[in-house]
Structures are given as C-alpha cells and as structure tokens.
Amino acid sequence: MAVSDKDTAAKEYMRDAETFADAFNFLLYDGQQIIKPERLKPLDTTAVVLPYGDDGASVPVQKYRDVMKMVTVMEDDRAAYLLLGIENQSDIHYAMPVRNMLYDAVQYVSQVDQSAKSHRNGGAKPETGAEFLSGFYRTDKLIPVITLTLYFGAEQWTAPTDLYGMLSADAEILRFVDNYHLHLIAPAQISDKDFDKFHTELKQVLKFIKNSLSKKRLNELVHEDETYRHISRKTANMLNIITGSNLKYDSREETVDMCRAIEEIRNDAIAEGIQTGMEKGLEEGMEKGMEKGTFSTLSSLVKKGILTLAQAAEEANMTVSEFKAKTDLNA
C-alpha cells in the first residue's frame, strides 16, 4: 500500500469531530470527555507566513496541516480557546519535533498578523510607538496551539520526541536553547488499560495496529473482544489501508465482523495450500502430494499464529496428537 494512500485514509478518518476530540481528550485530559465534538470548528489547513530574506524581501512559506480545528473548552466556568492540529504518520519521522515546531510557529505568526490587520481595519488605536511598530498591542493575547502526532504504525516510535534529542550540544549550551516537545500517540506505547481511555472506534484502530505484527495476537484480539464483531465500515476500511491486512468483507455492509473477515483470510490461505498440495500431487502422486501439501500448509499456519493447533487438527479431520505426529510440530 502506498504511503500516500495511508496518509489520505488517516486524514479522512481523523477529520471526524468525535474521533478528533477523542484523541485530544486522551492526550490532554487522560480520557475525560472535556473537549466536546460539537464545539470543534474546522480550520483551513493551509498556513502562509512571510519571513524576510537577507535582502529584506519577504519569502512566502506555505505549510499544510493534516487536520486543524479550533475548540472552545469550558474550564472552571470560563471559556478557553485552543487551536488543535493533528499530524498523521504512517512511518516514523526522525525530524518530527522540528516539523511540528515550525507548524506551531507559523500558526502563531499568523495570529500576530491577524491582530495587526484587525487594528489597521478600525480597531483600537495604538497607545505607544512600540504598539504601532509591531502591530501587536500590549493587551493582545495569542490562542494556544497544540499539535498532536498520531503514529499509525505497529512498531515502537524510535525517533526523537523533543528538539534536544536532535541536537548535538552539551548541557551548558542546552541551557540557552528552548526545547520543543513532541506530543505523540503511538499504539505500541499504549498500555492495555489505557486503551479504555478512548471512547470512539479510535480505540479499536489503535489496538488492532498494536497487535498487527503478530497474527496470533491479532487473531486472539478479534476473537476475544466483542467490539470487533460490529466495527463500522469506515473503521474497517481505514484498518485495511493502514495495515494492509487484505480483510475480506462486503463493502455494502454498515458494520463489519472483523472476526469473520480474518476467518476469510484464513480460509483462503488453507484453500491455497490445498491447491498447492494438489499441484504437487500431479507430479509426485496425487494422494501423497495432496497430503504433504495440506499438512505442510496447516503446520505453517499454526506456526504463524493464524490457526491454533486445535483448529488445524480439525481441518485435517484428526485429533491434536494425530496431527502433531504427522507434522513437524512434535519437535
């Protein structure tokens, strides 16, 4: 699956207000439902800032955010305004702190410019020369910007999580360098109990991704967790693209049984193995080839965690001990 396909799927998924709010409630409020989806206002994801070059000429810099929203949060009976951005990553990015720091800086510069523009267009007159020159008045305030990196990979995030992690400098120098911290959600770094702090199907997405490197663990997850029996088609599509799972289900259904979808993959693998055995049988003797190919395939599926030993034995119409005696699983 191309990286661009994964990025597009992630952007579409995280634009949903409930899912977006769920991610930030996990990050900021330990899962408490403080940010309300209905209070989220989508923002233009294009930001333009005009820094000045060596010759004094302005140089336009344009940055595109994945998802950007403004929210009003009620704290102690007063409204707090926040600008929240999500940067989705299907792969590890080793310069993410600098990338997000630039996104945030561009957003702050834009706010300063908007304040100056507002004053020029008939707002309060400057009281001092300093206010006139900067366009930003002593009473002006900026809205906090928080950027969340949402990593849709199964591996541990091994890249730096702050600016200091990217710098080559001793502690004496770092005292004079402001650090920038990466706000990160990565499935592999979420404990099992912390998954319960999510309240949308983002929980099922992240748990599925965390377990996707092991077919055995993934098989156990979808069989033991009842919520995977009726996942929305939107979430199933997202997981199919992000993990490349090749899940099989009716795209017209509103909900998807992930357990059955994985069973379809397993059944296809078994059928493919039996077909391979039949083809070998044409060369080596039909009966012997079919038996050899079938047992080899079932044994391989057990080793990969796709089938349990009991399931494999049942497919072969044998007891577990008889099946083990016919394969290399006895070793």
Image (spheres, rainbow, N blue to C red):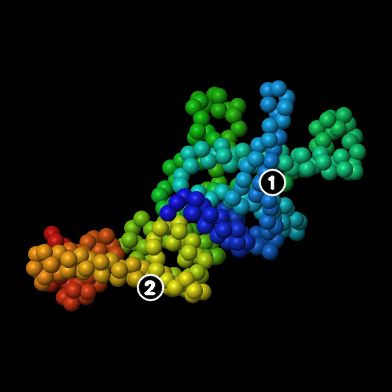
Q: Residue at x 52, y 61 (%)?
A: 202
Kind of element beneath mark 2: helix
Can residue 300 be seen in the rendering of this structure?
yes
Farthest residue toward the front? 282
Tag 1: amino acid: Pro
Q: Which residue is mark 2?
A: 260
Q: Which residue is mark 1?
A: 144
Tag 2: amino acid: Arg
Q: Position of residue 243 (x, y in %)?
A: 42, 57
Q: Position of residue 254 (x, y in %)?
A: 51, 74
Question: Which of the 4 image quarters holds residue 244?
Answer: bottom left
| In the image: residue 29, left or right of residue 322 | right
Kind of element beneath mark 1: loop
Measure how far apart labels 2 and 1 are at the Cα level: 45 Å
| In the image: residue 34, left or right of residue 91 | right
The total number of labels drawn is: 2
User: For mark 2, does the 10 Å Cα neighbourhood hold few (<14), some (14 to 19), or many (20 or more) residues?
Assistant: some
